[in-house]
């Protein structure tokens, strides 16, 4: 009888422990979800419980075999599969970040299936195999899953073993390495003013050749251009060229500029790269071949300092140590016919810089949404809605829906938010200060502006 009671007690206690375990798991999920917006839970579901602290020695060994050894030594084999099983058994969703990083370079379909299944188990969800890498990474970003211990060191091993030239890029800094992924091209590390040299990269253009508006016969009047005016001198950067180059280092109106264009974000920006703090050499901006939440990652060729492309400040390297923040000039998105009529003295880049290509990716490859992982998107506007973005004198980011603002301005209505006022310029829109001075606005897709300015205000009539 005593033995029977003892057995029943054990069963009872086991049931209590299982119940408590489930309750604790639900509590962890609730705690993890508490800081997430409702629209994230609605789209991605509840996040898994997330442990804290270091990895066990067994897990550290498994990470070494599955992720480091796989790319630096042996490739994928039985040891890696066994190590991946150990990782999945840990139920630690933080390790799904490393699976995501490896999936970006996994060429074999069967390996992708294996990695996708492992990530699904760690995240407690079922993901489609089609675009599994994107789905895994979207969930990780949206749920804000923390990185595992020593994440950068392992990620660096993966990336630098596969793509040469990134060894000086993957360093500690004010950058969220979880969100960095490969854009599918190599780093542009050609010397300054050597941009005619062929590269297996997105080729920047340094000091590009230009012609006057009257001598420019190649652009059609309805071609989209990015117009910049500095100290009374205007220049048009045709989208056909910027789609191919994505980065220009130029001089306009006596000022040096670095001009990145992110096709994925619909954003051309212009940064002054002169009048810098003492001891800082002019940054020569290049495309790294990396993306962060679908925005290009640019870096300085001289110091290999990485910049936040959307915000213009250095986040790694010597320039980050100096706290370098580049000042932004206004970029007006319009068409060539309207720009040259409003700015008859404008120059424009020559046709040969398009390298014989006439691409227009804007409504092609990513018409159904961003093709790279971005996680969650503020639902106040559609992801690809065009906005004009600016920063107020108080430091508040504000976005203006371009379509609505254009109608209002055309009617003669005033659009003002704090000190920021919108104006029409050559068929496009720019933001100016209360005194009419330039404050460095530009156009972008809503998903990009709202991601890099998560506290942005959204103007409404």
Image (cartoon, rainbow, N blue to C red):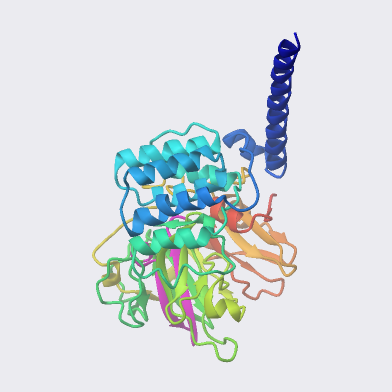
Q: Is residue 255 magenta?
A: yes
Does 397 sit above or below residue 279?
above
Asked whether the viewer can see residue 338, the reply is no
Expressed as whole percent of the image width and height from the top left, the position of residue 257 reads 48, 79
261 and 132: which one is in front?
A: 132
User: What range of the chain is rendered magenta?
Assistant: 242-264
Main SS, magenta region, reads strand
Q: Position of residue 216 (x, y in %)?
A: 31, 73
Q: Quadrant of the N terminus?
A: top right
In the foreground, 294 or 88: 88
- In the image: residue 116, left or right of residue 319: left
The location of residue 100, given as percent across then percent down, is 45, 48
- Asked whether the viewer can see residue 421, the reply is yes
Q: Residue at x 72, y 71 (%)?
A: 434
Residue 238 location (% of width, % of height) = 38, 66
Towards the viewer: 402 or 201: 201
User: Which quadrant of the view contains residue 197?
Assistant: bottom left
Q: Is residue 271 magenta?
A: no
Q: Is residue 81 above or below residue 196?
A: above
């Amino acid at each position: 009888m005593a033995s029977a009671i003892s057995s029943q007690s054990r069963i009872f206690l086991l049931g209590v422990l299982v119940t408590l375990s489930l309750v604790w798991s639900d509590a962890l999920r609730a705690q993890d979800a508490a800081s997430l917006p409702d629209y994230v839970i609605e789209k991605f579901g509840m996040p898994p419980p997330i442990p804290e602290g270091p990895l066990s020695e067994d897990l550290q060994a498994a990470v070494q075999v599955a992720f480091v050894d796989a790319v630096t030594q042996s490739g994928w084999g039985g040891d890696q599969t066994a190590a991946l099983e150990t990782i999945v058994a840990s139920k630690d969703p933080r390790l799904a970040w490393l699976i995501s990083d490896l999936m970006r370079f996994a060429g074999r379909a069967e390996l992708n299936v294996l990695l996708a299944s492992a990530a699904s188990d760690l995240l407690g969800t079922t993901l489609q195999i089609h675009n599994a890498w994107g789905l895994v990474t979207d969930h990780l970003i949206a749920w804000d899953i923390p990185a595992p211990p020593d994440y950068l060191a392992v990620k660096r091993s993966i990336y630098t073993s596969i793509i040469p030239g990134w060894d000086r890029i993957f360093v500690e800094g004010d950058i969220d390495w979880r969100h960095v992924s490969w854009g599918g091209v190599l780093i542009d590390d050609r010397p300054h003013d050597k941009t005619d040299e062929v590269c297996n990269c997105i080729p920047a253009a340094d000091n590009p050749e230009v012609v006057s508006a009257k001598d420019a016969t190649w652009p059609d009047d309805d071609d989209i251009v990015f117009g910049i005016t500095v100290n009374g001198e205007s220049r048009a950067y045709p989208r056909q060229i910027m789609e191919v180059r994505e980065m220009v280092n130029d001089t306009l109106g006596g000022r040096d500029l670095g001009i990145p264009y992110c096709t994925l974000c619909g954003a051309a920006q212009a940064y002054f790269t002169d009048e810098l703090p003492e001891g800082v050499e002019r940054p020569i901006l290049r495309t790294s071949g990396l993306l962060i939440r679908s925005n290009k990652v640019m870096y300085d060729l001289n110091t290999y300092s990485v910049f936040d492309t959307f915000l213009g400040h250095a986040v790694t390297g010597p320039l980050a140590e100096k706290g370098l923040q580049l000042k932004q000039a206004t970029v007006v998105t319009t068409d060539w016919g309207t720009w040259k009529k409003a700015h008859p003295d404008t120059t424009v880049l020559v046709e040969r810089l398009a390298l014989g290509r006439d691409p227009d990716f804007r409504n092609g490859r990513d018409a159904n949404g961003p093709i790279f992982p971005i996680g969650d998107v503020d639902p106040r506007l559609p992801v690809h809605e065009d906005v004009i973005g600016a920063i107020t004198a108080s430091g508040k980011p504000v976005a203006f829906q371009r379509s609505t603002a254009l109608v209002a301005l055309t009617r003669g209505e005033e659009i003002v938010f704090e000190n920021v006022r919108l104006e029409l310029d050559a068929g496009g829109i720019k933001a100016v200060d209360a005194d009419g001075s330039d404050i460095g606005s530009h156009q972008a897709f809503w998903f990009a502006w709202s991601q890099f300015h998560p506290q942005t205000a959204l103007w409404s009539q």
